[in-house]
Amino acid sequence: MSFRDETAWLDATALADLVRRKEVTPNELVEAAIERIERINPEINAVVTPMYDLARAAARSPIPDGPFTGVPFLLKDLLAAFGGVRMTSGSSFLSDFVPEEDSELVKRFKQAGLIIVGKTNTPEFGILPTTEPALFGPSRNPWDITRTTGGSSGGSAAAVAAGLVPMAHANDGGGSIRIPASACGLFGFKPTRARISLAPDFGDMYSGLVCEHAVTRSVRDSAALLDAVSGFKDGDPYCAPPRNRPFSREIGVDPGKLRIAFTTKALADVPVHEDCIAAVKDAASLCEQLGHSVVESSPKIDGDKLADAFAIMWSAGCAWTIDGLAHTSGREPTEERFEPGTWFLYQKGRERKASRYLAAVQHMQRVSRTIAEFLSGADLLLTPTLAQPPLPIGSFDSTKENPVRGLKLSGNFSPFTALCNATGQPAMSVPLFWNEEGLPIGTQFIGRFGDEATLFRLASQLEGARPWSNRRPAIHA
């Protein structure tokens, strides 16, 4: 078997099955992934910290018997700490910061049998919906290397889209799983708030805006990985509602006749590109063909007030993050150590009053009540994932003279995703549509709080009706 050719486009579930049947060895899969990274990464700049020696050692050692034993995997260079390996968070401020221990999530990845071969690119502290940090330079979209991968999990998405690995770690504080999944033609699933523990360093982040998971090519990989890594850790401040059964058992299950509301309009007054509108209408038509009831409708939420509340929480969170890292690393935050937009957000966060922050949290909670009431009359809400196709690299660049340029464009590019971070609901970006330029345009489905099961059932049905795994970008293994 030529591993370079024949294993590059198998999903993680299929690769693990080959290992179990002893048709390949973990070492062979790791070497094949390393070869692909070495050959393709110079074009897309997805992997910024190779971990080849550690991966080879892990492949030769006893590997835990999990659902993905022996499968190569990549960590996003943000939040998920691997003890002894640098974690920069995409920032020059942390260019040589090395955590001492694994985060709980990394421990669970390892227990699932995954072998981590490297860390992927991310914008500074995951702030922007593009992956173009000054520290490492831009990740490039495998479908068109002049375009953004999205962010903040853009390095992971580029790696999976190009066939370097079948899935990769990602996290999401305002859409950072779903945005790059849309831009790179992948399945991106954001779980319910607190489905995956942020232990040991965090109880929650930004009052629950941030969650962990992955970008994948197949729906079944996403479900099985969520089974493997989800769950409460002693000391967590709260946890997601318990699942009825493993998420992997929802794959292939008939979702029944779902009531799907859809909208192509952003909550705030933001223009939506005709390709993104077309993608939603196409997805709505496909759902109707599959027997679901589809009605144009949306919750009544003041998008501008939601954006203001989100900005308050995000800026305060940025200040908390940088001050916390300064304390941990013993380094003094100074303007020249950060990108202009990050420094602006940091300064704004330090100016925020605690009362304004708590008022923003209260507003988010009111929005959560509104969306919960709306979804009492519908099973799912369908929207665009993004308001525009993947933009040219450099579109989000900011300067000291205009530090807010990238931040302002972020709201126009991704006005649909942050709602679910505010409310904690599960949501997914599904790759059902490509425009005339050959760029992927994802569509977002939003589920009820705690109801990942319905999303996985529908995703599996959509994947079966319109498979995307046979699509290959211009840059691929």
Image (spheres, rainbow, N blue to C red):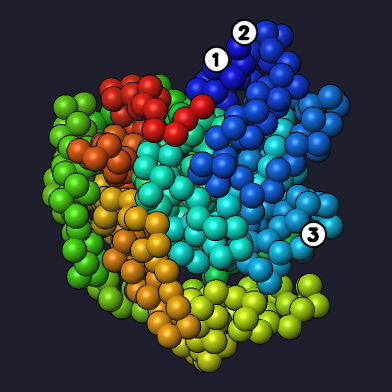
In the rendered image, the quadrant that contains the N terminus is top right
Give 128 or 447, whichever is nearer the viewer. Answer: 128
Q: Amino acid at mark 3?
A: Val
Q: Residue at x 71, y 19 (%)?
A: 28
- Estimate the spatial distance between the alpha carbons at disc 3 and disc 2, rounded to whole Å: 38 Å
> Do the residues bearing badges 3 and 2 touch, measured as CB atoms within 8 Å?
no
Residue 372 relative to residue 269: left or right: right
Residue 6: which disc? Answer: 1
Classify residue 18 by image quadrant: top right
> Do the residues bearing badges 2 and 1 touch, measured as CB atoms within 8 Å?
yes
Residue 192 visible? no
In the rendered image, the vertical position of residue 88 relative to residue 212, given as above or below: below
> Looking at the picture, how far across and down is residue 357, in whole percent?
49, 83
| Residue at the spot of label 3 | 98
| Residue at the spot of label 2 | 1
Name the element at disc 2.
Answer: loop
Q: Amino acid at mark 2?
A: Met
> Looking at the picture, how far across and down is residue 52, in whole percent?
75, 36
- Estimate the spatial distance between the alpha carbons at disc 2 and disc 1, rounded to whole Å: 7 Å
Q: Amino acid at mark 1?
A: Glu
Residue 298 visible? yes
Q: Residue at x 39, y 66 (%)?
A: 396
How many labels sit on residues?
A: 3
Q: Earlier in the sequence, mark 3 or mark 1?
A: 1
- Estimate the spatial distance between the alpha carbons at disc 3 and disc 1, rounded to whole Å: 36 Å
Q: Residue at x 81, y 38 (%)?
A: 54
- Nearer to us of marks 3 and 2 is 2
In the rendered image, the vertical position of residue 268 relative to residue 420, given as above or below: below
Classify residue 333 by image quadrant: bottom right
Name the element at disc 1.
Answer: helix
Q: Earlier in the sequence, mark 3 or mark 2?
A: 2
